[in-house]
Image: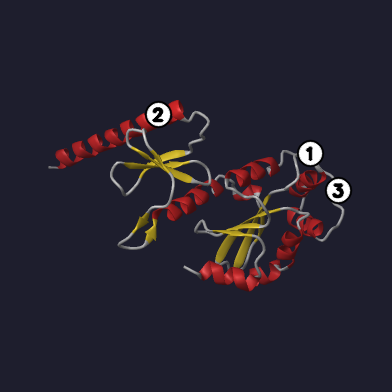
């Protein structure tokens, strides 16, 4: 019996692998410009999920048909597509180690938010001016750089200088208060952060990602953020 179960498992795994290969081949043939991060099975037999950055699409097992839209499980009202997008965001954000972020940790820590920030953005500055209140609520803030101006701009170079500073937390706070920051250069993660933000669909700042993958666009007060975090 155990051998039969093991054999069945191998067969199913091989079948899944074969289906994924077929789908990739078809996507490369029909949509060579499409960036596919991953191909996954869905709860629906014969329907596969394609991860394409911040979005997901669906395809038939033979790769001949492409679907876009939301899948909802009627019995439970679960939005399968929204859940998939949230998990995709979580996976993408996990690609940046803590050592590359500027952390304002709460003690004790109840929640973590990851925030794409622009040092010259007015609402980003307002958000940061309330960092102590956020920490008092048990909310830790992990900052990633997202200068909205082009690479090489003053705003971009300012972000590089902050991340290269000997005390990035202090430098970030000074910069958000409008202070002049000493220009520094180092192998900073600013370009990588910006590219990740673009891939996640970030178009403005602050963009606040919750631990469960939900995305909040723009500034919210500490009270509102706490409410949204606890909203299930």
Left or right of 103 in this view: 6 = left
Question: Percent position (x, y) of residue 59?
Answer: 38, 39
Can residue 137 be seen here? The reply is no
Which of the two labelled residues, at mark 3 and mark 1, occupies the earlier sequence position?
A: 1
Label 1: state its secondary structure.
Answer: loop
Q: Of tags 3 and 1, which is closer to the observer?
A: 1
Residue beneath label 2, please?
26
Front one among 132 and 198? 198
Q: Which mark is residue 182?
A: 3
Crowding at dot 2, Cα within 10 Å, few <14 / some 14-19 / many 20+, comes out as: some
Front one among 88 and 163? 88
Residue sitting at 79 percent across and 40 percent down? 185
Q: Which mark is residue 203?
A: none
Residue sitting at 62 percent across and 63 percent down? 140
Q: Of tags 2 and 1, which is closer to the observer?
A: 2
Seen in the picture, residue 31 relative to 96 is either above or below; the reply is: above
Which of the two labelled residues, at mark 2 and mark 1, occupies the earlier sequence position?
A: 2
Question: Percent position (x, y) of residue 168?
Answer: 74, 53
Residue sitting at 43 percent across and 55 percent down? 83
Seen in the picture, residue 207 relative to 26 is either above or below; the reply is: below
Front one among 148 and 104? 148
Seen in the picture, residue 33 relative to 210 is either above or below; the reply is: above
Residue beneath label 1, please?
152
Crowding at dot 3, Cα within 10 Å, few <14 / some 14-19 / many 20+, comes out as: few
């Amino acid at each position: 019996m155990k051998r039969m179960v093991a054999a069945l498992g191998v067969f199913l795994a091989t079948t899944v692998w074969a289906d994924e290969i077929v789908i990739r081949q078809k996507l490369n043939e029909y949509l060579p410009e499409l960036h596919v991060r991953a191909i996954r099975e869905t709860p629906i037999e014969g329907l596969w999920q394609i991860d394409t950055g911040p979005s997901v699409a669906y395809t038939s097992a033979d790769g001949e048909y492409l679907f876009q839209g939301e899948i909802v499980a009627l019995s439970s009202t679960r939005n399968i597509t929204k859940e998939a997008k949230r998990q995709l965001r979580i996976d993408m954000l996990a690609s940046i180690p803590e050592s590359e972020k500027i952390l304002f940790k709460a003690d004790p820590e109840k929640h973590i938010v990851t925030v794409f920030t622009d040092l010259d953005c007015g609402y980003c500055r307002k958000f940061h001016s309330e960092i102590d209140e956020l920490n008092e609520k048990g909310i830790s803030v992990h900052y990633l750089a997202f200068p909205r101006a082009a690479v090489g701009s003053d705003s971009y170079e300012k972000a590089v200088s902050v991340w290269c500073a000997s005390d990035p937390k202090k430098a970030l706070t000074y910069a958000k208060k409008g202070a002049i920051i000493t220009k520094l250069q180092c192998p900073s993660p600013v370009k990588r952060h910006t590219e990740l933000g673009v891939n996640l669909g970030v178009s403005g700042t602050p963009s606040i990602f919750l631990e469960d993958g939900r995305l909040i666009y723009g500034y919210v007060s500490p009270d509102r953020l706490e409410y949204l975090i606890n909203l299930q």
